[in-house]
Amino acid sequence: TDSAPIHLSYHYGNHYNSVYDPNNPTFGVGFGLPGLVPGSADKQVVQQAMQESEQQIINEELIEQAKKESDQQLVNQAINESDKQLVNHVMAESEQYVLNQQIMDQITQQSETDMLEAQLIETITKESENQFINDDFDAQQYWDMTEAELLEQAKRESWFEYQKMN
């Protein structure tokens, strides 16, 4: 046969050890195990360990790649959220600016209107005084008028004066 015989060593008168060549495994040879190929078990274990190791490396690489993709997705999502928040903030600020401008325009228009009304009242008052002096009219009618009626009267009189001039 191609297999080496089993070698035994006797120790201290009570103990046997088998002696074998580690480079030529012969375990199971001679015991009647059909199809036994010495050393094939070791080769299979090593081959299986290598396959498991390769599979583990592949799995770790896939997990690492998935983490990177997940991290990139989270970063992109955070950027998108940040962009949306920034756009919303800018839009809110823009709307507030427009509202403030409209309020300022209304205030300006109101103050211009108030100034014109004050000038008109002053002019009418002067004209009324002149007319009162010149025409000797009844002042009692003006004492009984409210401020709104006086303003309306002044507008009418200034309109008539404007019409006379043109």
Image (cartoon, rainbow, N blue to C red):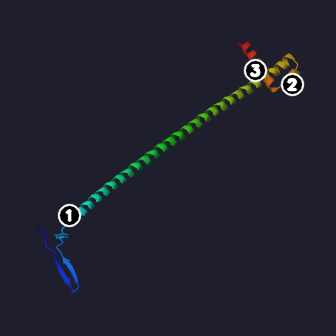
Residue at 73 percent across and 13 percent down: it is 163
Residue type highlighted by circle 2: Trp
Nearer to us of marks 2 and 1 is 1
Reading the chain from its start, which is encountered first: label 2 or label 1? 1
Q: Are marks 1 and 3 in contact (CB under 8 Å)?
A: no
Q: Are marks 3 and 2 in contact (CB under 8 Å)?
A: no
Residue tagged 3: 155
The residues tagged by marks 2 and 1 sit, at their Cα atoms, a distance apart of: 128 Å
Reading the chain from its start, which is encountered first: label 1 or label 3? 1
Residue 151: percent from the left, percent from the top? Answer: 78, 24
Residue tagged 1: 40
Residue type highlighted by circle 1: Ser
Residue 60: percent from the left, percent from the top? Answer: 34, 56
- Asked if residue 116 can be seen in this view, the reply is yes
The residues tagged by marks 3 and 2 sit, at their Cα atoms, a distance apart of: 17 Å
Tell me the quarter of the picture where residue 26 sits.
bottom left
Nearer to us of marks 1 and 3 is 1
Residue at 16 percent across and 75 percent down: it is 6
Residue at 50 percent across and 41 percent down: it is 84
Q: Is residue 78 above or below residue 135?
A: below
Residue at 30 percent across and 56 percent down: it is 55
The residues tagged by marks 1 and 3 sit, at their Cα atoms, a distance apart of: 119 Å
Q: Is residue 53 left or right of residue 155?
A: left
Reading the chain from its start, which is encountered first: label 3 or label 2? 2
Residue tagged 2: 143
